[in-house]
Amino acid sequence: MAPLLGVRLCRGFSLYRTFVSSSRYYSAMANFLVDDPKYSWLKDLGISSQNQGVYHGKWCGSGQEVTTYCPANNKPIAQVTTGNAADYETAVQASLTAWDHWADLPGPQRGEIVRQIGEAFRDKKHLLGKLIALEMGKIAAEGEGEVQELIDICDYAVGLSRMFAGHVFPSERKGHLLLEQWNPLGVVGVITAFNFPCAVYGWNASLALVCGNTMLWKGAPSTPLVSVAMTKIISEVLDRNKIPGGVCALVSGGADIGTLMAKDERVKLLSFTGSTPVGHKVSMMVQERFGKFLLELGGNNAIVVNEDADVDMVVRSALFACAGTAGQRCTTTRRLILHEKVHDEIVERLSKAYSLLRVGDPIEEDTLYGPLHNQEAVDKFKAAVEAAKAQGGTVVCGGKVMDREGNYVEPTIVTGLAHDAPIVLQETFVPIVYVLKCKNVDEAMAWNNEVKQGLSSSLFTKDLSAIFKWMGPKGSDCGIVNVNIPTSGAEIGGAFGGEKHTGGGRESGSDAWKQYVRRSTCTLNFSKELPLAQGIKFE
């Protein structure tokens, strides 16, 4: 069980084996990108060739020294010293101690600290976005967009810090007041994934902090520099306000740290983003100790296209939803369910749009399509293409590994598969979309719901009756149900998450904040009588 928690995780969320036990190590004489003048801007984020990966008020690290690589060229960026069990214990104790101070601060004062954190990320948005592009592999525009997502949720949390609305209920007893009070949990643990190494922590931390919790974070093993850079930004705000560093502790590491978090009764809530198999293991460990967990797991998302859809909008939407982030979003469109009357036209136009994607180094501003995160993802891409062919599919676009340095593959379109072909029902975290031909929108809705995951979905149509059916009890069974927009690109104002094997968790907006608090139902007697509820007499 333990090795599973050391995997490379994804927000959507494919499962990759961690490099902690088998990573390539470079000698002290290695040439790191951080020392190349081209990447001198990394030093403005506090990144050097050797970095400590544990923070709890001071920086340290006694675990393995790991090397992080750039997916665009597989060159080493820098090294990070991770945490071990002793570092973890020190960090937990620091978070517990910090909670005594943090929970006593009024909500609006906590909100002010979160506001300052958001402002600090505004100042570093461009640089941090470039680091995300360099270490994760998504294009710079998406990297900056991820930082903006963190900034936006900080803004949201600032307002929330004055609006933790409980209820006052009419009591059936004279001279009594019945109400509910929301209180913080304590230490909140967060395990995030490589594909969104910044935003998902922001979703959790901003809400949990204003609710009065302290944070214990383990980022993905393959994106430790983003975790270190973000924690440096946050720690400067905490130091400036004389807030204990344990309020936002970081322990970089792999399986050992993840397992400690899952089994630790002091971690009152564990938010886990990753694959469905690993999420299941995590939930069982947390449930075993009667802890709380928040799961954001896999997605096998579909765009359904009715015969009356605006084809221009469909093609533009599918281009980003299928090929954006090189297919490594939890909300990436993996199935295009097209009405038979528009199937051929959309396939032809989408294939042409794919051919025009500007492939390149993700840190370059004009690049639209970057690499996969690692070689294992490339191998999974090749295996999925072969499986699709073996099961009756036809590759009409892409299907090959690109002949260039780095982990680049062609964005791929496959037609001709059965809607229930094994490869179609399987989430593969790569840029392959399976195009299915349906006879009507009712059939398409049924196909949308037949996969085990239930994250995101979208229907393109002008038919109001189809729209309201899609949004209703017999429509899409996903947590995100869109109309005439792609499956990806969620805003922070709504709750983010999905049903079934996606895990049922909700993060970000709406009332997702309630997952970071405990509810106390309080009855206050301000009379001199002691009446029992339901009129019971016990005299």
Image (cartoon, helix red, strand yellow):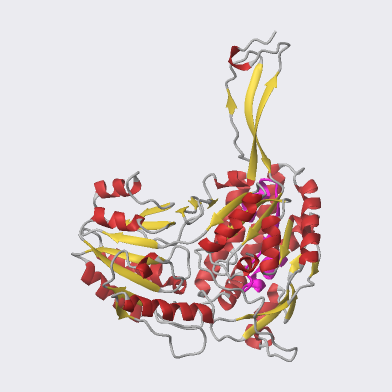
Choose top left, top right, bottom left or bottom right for residue 487. Answer: bottom left
Q: Is residue 414 above or below residue 298?
A: below
Q: Quadrant of the C terminus?
A: top right
Number of numbered labels in the structure image: 0
- The reply to whether residue 263 is in sight is yes
**Viewer-side residue, 500 vs 524:** 500
Residue 433 lies, in percent from the top left, at 36, 71
Q: Is residue 408 above or below residue 244?
A: below
Which residue sits at x=72%, y=67%? 232
Residue 180 lies, in percent from the top left, at 63, 31
Which residue sits at x=28%, y=57%? 444
Residue lying farthest to the top in this orientation? 539
- The reply to whether residue 240 is in sight is no
- Asked if residue 318 lies left or right of residue 62, the reply is left
- Asked if residue 181 lies left or right of residue 378, the reply is right
Residue lying farthest to the left in this orientation? 341
Choose top left, top right, bottom left or bottom right for residue 386. Answer: bottom left
Which residue sits at x=48%, y=80%? 378
Residue 348 lies, in percent from the top left, at 25, 75
Q: Is 206 within the magenta?
A: yes
**Viewer-side residue, 158 vs 344:** 344
Residue 533 lies, in percent from the top left, at 61, 17
Q: Is residue 117 above or below residue 473?
A: below
- Asked if residue 448 lies left or right of residue 123, the reply is left
Q: Quadrant of the N terminus?
A: bottom right
Q: Is 225 within the magenta?
A: yes
- The residues colored magenta run 204-232
